Amino acid sequence: MRYSIKIIPKSSKNEIIEQHDDFLKIKIKAIPEHGKANEELIKFLSKSFKIPKSNIQIIKGNNSRNKIVEIN
């Protein structure tokens, strides 16, 4: 399944703040430097969906707040 995700980095906690069928808006604690926010996003999605991190891949938007993520 593919999701369009908008992340808000440097937040006080990791949380999903908006959810629709294939769209998520997520607050992430990590800063958007050197891939830290992407790593935190994958870790957070892994815990939220209770799946291994290896099943989550950022398809588009590695350097953007708007991402497309595939979850197997």
Image (cartoon, rainbow, N blue to C red):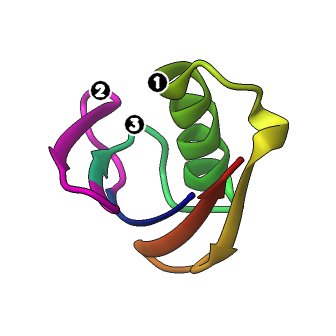
Q: Earlier in the sequence, mark 1 or mark 3?
A: 3
Give the residue pinned by disc 3. 29
Determine whether the residue tagged by mark 2 lies in a helix, strand or loop: loop
For residue 60, what is the image quadrant?
A: bottom right
Near mark 3 (Cα within 10 A), the count class, few <14, some 14-19 or many ≥20, is some
Q: Earlier in the sequence, mark 2 or mark 1?
A: 2
Q: Earlier in the sequence, mark 2 or mark 3?
A: 2
Residue at 36%, 53% (x, y): give it.
9
Q: Nearer the viewer, residue 63 or 49?
A: 49
Q: Could you tell whether 66 is left or right of 56 in the image? A: left
Near mark 2 (Cα within 10 A), the count class, few <14, some 14-19 or many ≥20, is few
Relative to 44, is 62 above or below? Answer: below
Which quarter of the rendering shows the N terminus? bottom right
Give the residue pinned by disc 1. 48
Give the residue pinned by disc 2. 13
Q: Position of residue 57 (x, y in %)?
A: 73, 58
Select label 2 or label 1 by which is in front: 1
Question: Disc 1 residue type?
Answer: Ser
Q: Could you tell whether 54 is left or right of 68 in the image? A: right
Select label 1 or label 3 by which is in front: 1
Residue at 53%, 35% (x, y): give it.
45
The range drawn in magenta is 8-24
Q: Determine contact: label 2, label 3, CB under 8 Å.
A: yes
For residue 14, what is the image quadrant?
A: top left
Residue at 84%, 39% (x, y): give it.
54
Relative to 41, is 24 above or below? Answer: below
In 3D space, how far apart are the residues under numbered discs 2 and 1 (Cα atoms)?
A: 14 Å
Q: Could you tell whether 40 is left or right of 72 in the image? A: left
For residue 53, what is the image quadrant?
A: top right
In 3D space, how far apart are the residues under numbered discs 2 and 3 (Cα atoms)?
A: 5 Å
